[in-house]
């Protein structure tokens, strides 16, 4: 803590200097002639604090993506979204992010399928709490807000790193409208169709949105089917009604299906030799189906306050199978087993996986009027969830004298039933015209019931491989419950209407859970792991400069992190269960801004720095097997210290069909990161260049775009099972055309 206090004091001095300069600039620009023909930045409204506010008035570090931003940058999935935001990252898994996604904000993340997420994701206020749903498409989005830092007060558990709040376009009862957009490129075709129709003018309406996204197999496979790409179909129907003069109800149902395919796993040697094809007989593949139903009732009280009821129901089913390793990768293991007399032994290089997830949630919320000194939100929340997971494992062999039969299949099936209740409140109070105090508290209760069953079909194999200290448990039942609090408090000082600074302290909480794969009878592999907590200390500032032509947002933070849920190594069984690392930490900052330069030019940029390390993690799994090691002091895996982006754009009048033409070029950067806790497998820093040029008017639009134009080579995953390093590559260069029709 002394180190942090020193850094905070030093950073505060820097902030004060920057703020003094910025307010001076603001005063100067305020004296300029208001009749000058200037293009000002449009204000951005957000609902980060569950009430509508200008983003510059919210004491939270926020990155906002509008519908136009998403389309312009070809951001059509959550994967693309988080990769474009400073201090936010998306990746992970031996075959990339499709099966075991790693999502982190400020270095706080999780990639374990069995554990809850560390970054919350919400669709119109409904929580998405299962990891496989984090690879969904973005359909007919109005806006996406990425909130950095723990959001436990208003958004509950499992939001330690932050939250991603997705807001869809709602039915419009005033006008008939529609849109067709087609994005066709070298990596596939995506089509989105939207229709909106009033039912009763000014009171009720219906909206339908559908998208189909097809990316063909683009990785050549020498020994099996070509792989890569994906197929995604998504649809949403929304209905707006007005049961009373002061009451509105919005009901929606959304369905999505995805076919997921491995991007292509190859050995590190093949990657370094620039080999384009892979050799995997049965590459990873899977399917995912999800359903989301939502009902929101908003009643406006005469005083300007509102009552809100938000009900959600979700269902998700995921299945995948296939190989994550090139043919021959386990040749040494196979030769060893055959040397023991197990002829024709084949080591299965993948394990089938199935999961089903259901969730029912309910929130009641009262929001006070905004035009008063004391503003607040209070509410109650509850949810019921059930998760069923089945892991498969096994190997095959020819008939021999050592083992009976010709193979073995193991099935580890688990069921987790969870219940959560919470009461929360968050308030702001104007102590003076310039000084605002804010505070909030959530008190919650979590409980989980866990049931585990293991089955197999070959007793001789089990007797040979899993005996004594390594014998497997055939059943296990457990439960846990926890009462938790997630408070926040801070101050915000407004130097004037355009410049403010804030400081805050907030806490986050992540539920404990159970290891759902192999459990061993000797108890060396724990069935249960504890909940995770962190405290975030933050100072930040929001600035509007040069008469509204420039907008800046910046923040510094320090995160004290306890009982982080991580993979460990069990020397007796060689398993890698989830356990708790005693202590971790992350510190850094982010700054982002946008500016209208005049004469049609505009610019935007963002830079993030976060140093996330393990401070006390003594039993981390050694890369490639062979025991454990002390990871204390090492950088967290999949985490880049520096992330950033910049964009330069120009708009002009082509004097054609009332169109506005525009051209933009952007750059995204990510510094070096490690794939393992031992910090031995790394991807060096890299950047990608994207560009877009075209024109549009009120009804038509046509754009030519390119992604990763320099064809930068980089890895998205790397793993070592003990027989060498396996890697997956990121997307190379792509380009295409986007056309839109609106009415």
Image (cartoon, rainbow, N blue to C red):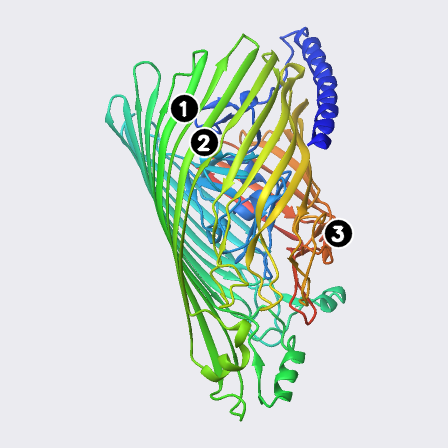
Tags 3 and 1 in contact by the CB under 8 Å rule?
A: no
Where is mark 2, residue-wise?
A: 154
Tags 2 and 1 in contact by the CB under 8 Å rule?
A: yes
Where is mark 1, residue-wise?
A: 377
| Quarter-of-image position of residue 108 | top right
- Drawn side of residue 287 relative to residue 400, left or right: left
Which of label 3 and label 1 is nearer to you?
A: 1
Asked whether 466 or 55 is in front, the reply is 466
Asked whether 211 or 686 is in front, the reply is 686
Q: Position of residue 568 (x, y in %)?
A: 60, 58
Residue 238 at least partly seen? no
How far is mark 2 from mark 1, CA to CA?
9 Å
Q: Earlier in the sequence, mark 3 or mark 2?
A: 2
Where is mark 3, residue-wise?
A: 684
- Drawn side of residue 542 relative to residue 15, left or right: left
| Quarter-of-image position of residue 397 | bottom right
């Amino acid at each position: 803590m002394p180190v942090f206090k020193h850094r905070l004091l030093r950073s505060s001095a820097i902030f004060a200097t920057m703020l003094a300069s910025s307010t001076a600039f603001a005063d100067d620009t305020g004296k300029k002639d208001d009749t000058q023909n200037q293009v000002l930045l449009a204000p951005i409204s957000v609902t980060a604090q569950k009430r509508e506010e200008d983003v510059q008035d919210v004491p939270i570090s926020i990155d906002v993506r509008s519908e136009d931003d998403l389309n312009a940058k070809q951001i059509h999935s959550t994967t693309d979204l988080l990769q474009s935001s400073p201090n936010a990252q998306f990746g992970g898994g031996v075959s990339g992010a499709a099966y075991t996604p790693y999502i982190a904000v400020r270095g706080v993340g999780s990639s374990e399928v069995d554990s809850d997420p560390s970054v919350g994701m919400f669709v119109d206020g409904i929580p998405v709490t299962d990891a496989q749903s984090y690879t969904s498409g973005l359909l007919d989005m109005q806006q996406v807000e990425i909130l950095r830092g723990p959001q436990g007060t208003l958004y509950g558990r499992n939001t330690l790193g932050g939250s991603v709040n997705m807001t869809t376009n709602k039915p419009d009862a005033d006008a008939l409208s529609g849109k067709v957009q087609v994005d066709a490129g070298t990596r596939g075709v995506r089509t989105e169709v939207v229709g909106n129709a009033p039912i009763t003018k000014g009171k009720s309406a219906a909206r339908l949105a559908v998208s189909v996204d097809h990316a063909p197999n683009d990785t050549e496979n020498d020994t099996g089917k070509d792989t890569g790409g994906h197929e995604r179909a998504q649809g949403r129907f929304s209905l707006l009604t007005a049961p009373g003069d002061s009451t509105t109800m919005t009901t929606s149902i959304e369905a999505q299906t995805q076919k997921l395919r491995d991007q292509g796993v190859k050995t590190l040697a093949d990657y370094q030799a620039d080999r384009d094809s892979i050799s995997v007989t049965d590459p990873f593949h899977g399917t995912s189906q999800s359903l989301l139903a939502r009902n929101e009732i908003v009643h406006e009280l005469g005083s300007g306050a509102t009552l809100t009821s938000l009900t959600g129901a979700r269902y998700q089913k995921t299945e995948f199978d296939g190989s994550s390793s090139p043919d021959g990768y386990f040749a040494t293991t196979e030769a060893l087993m055959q040397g023991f007399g197990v002829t024709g032994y084949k080591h299965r290089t993948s394990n089938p996986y199935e999961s089903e997830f259901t969730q029912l949630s309910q929130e009641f919320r009262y929001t006070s009027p905004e035009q008063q000194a004391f503003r607040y939100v209070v509410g109650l929340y509850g949810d019921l969830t059930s998760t069923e997971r089945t892991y498969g494992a096994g190997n095959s062999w020819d008939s021999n004298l050592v083992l009976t039969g010709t193979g073995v299949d193991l099935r580890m099936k688990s069921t987790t039933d969870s219940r959560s209740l919470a009461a929360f409140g968050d308030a702001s109070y104007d102590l003076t015209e310039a000084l605002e105090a804010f505070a909030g508290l959530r008190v919650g209760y979590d409980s989980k019931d866990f049931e585990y069953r293991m089955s197999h079909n070959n007793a001789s194999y089990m007797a040979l491989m899993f005996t004594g200290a390594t014998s497997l448990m055939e059943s296990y039942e457990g439960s846990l419950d926890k009462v938790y609090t997630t408070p926040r408090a801070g101050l915000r000082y407004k130097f004037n209407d355009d410049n403010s600074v804030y400081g805050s302290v907030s806490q986050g909480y992540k539920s404990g859970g159970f290891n759902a794969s192999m459990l061993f009878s000797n108890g060396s592999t724990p069935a249960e792991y504890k909940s995770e907590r962190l405290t975030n200390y933050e100072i930040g500032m929001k600035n509007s400069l040069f008469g509204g032509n420039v907008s800046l947002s910046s923040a510094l933070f320090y995160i004290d992190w306890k009982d982080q849920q991580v993979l460990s190594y069990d020397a007796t069984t060689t398993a890698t269960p989830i356990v708790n690392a005693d202590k971790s930490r992350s510190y850094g900052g982010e700054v982002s801004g946008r500016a209208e330069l005049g004469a049609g030019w505009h610019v935007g940029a963002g830079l993030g720095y976060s140093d996330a390390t393990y401070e006390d993690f003594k039993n981390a799994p050694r890369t490639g097997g062979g025991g454990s090691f002390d990871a204390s002091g090492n950088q967290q895996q999949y985490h880049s210290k520096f992330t950033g982006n910049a964009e330069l754009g120009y708009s002009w009048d082509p004097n054609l069909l009332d169109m506005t033409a525009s051209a933009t070029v952007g750059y995204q950067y990510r510094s070096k990161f490690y794939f393992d806790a031992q910090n031995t497998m790394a991807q060096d820093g890299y950047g990608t260049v994207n560009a877009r040029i075209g024109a549009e008017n009120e009804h038509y639009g046509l754009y030519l775009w390119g992604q990763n134009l320099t064809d930068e080579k980089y890895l998205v995953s790397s793993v070592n099972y003990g027989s060498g390093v396996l890697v997956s590559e990121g997307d190379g260069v792509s380009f295409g055309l986007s056309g839109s029709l609106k009415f």
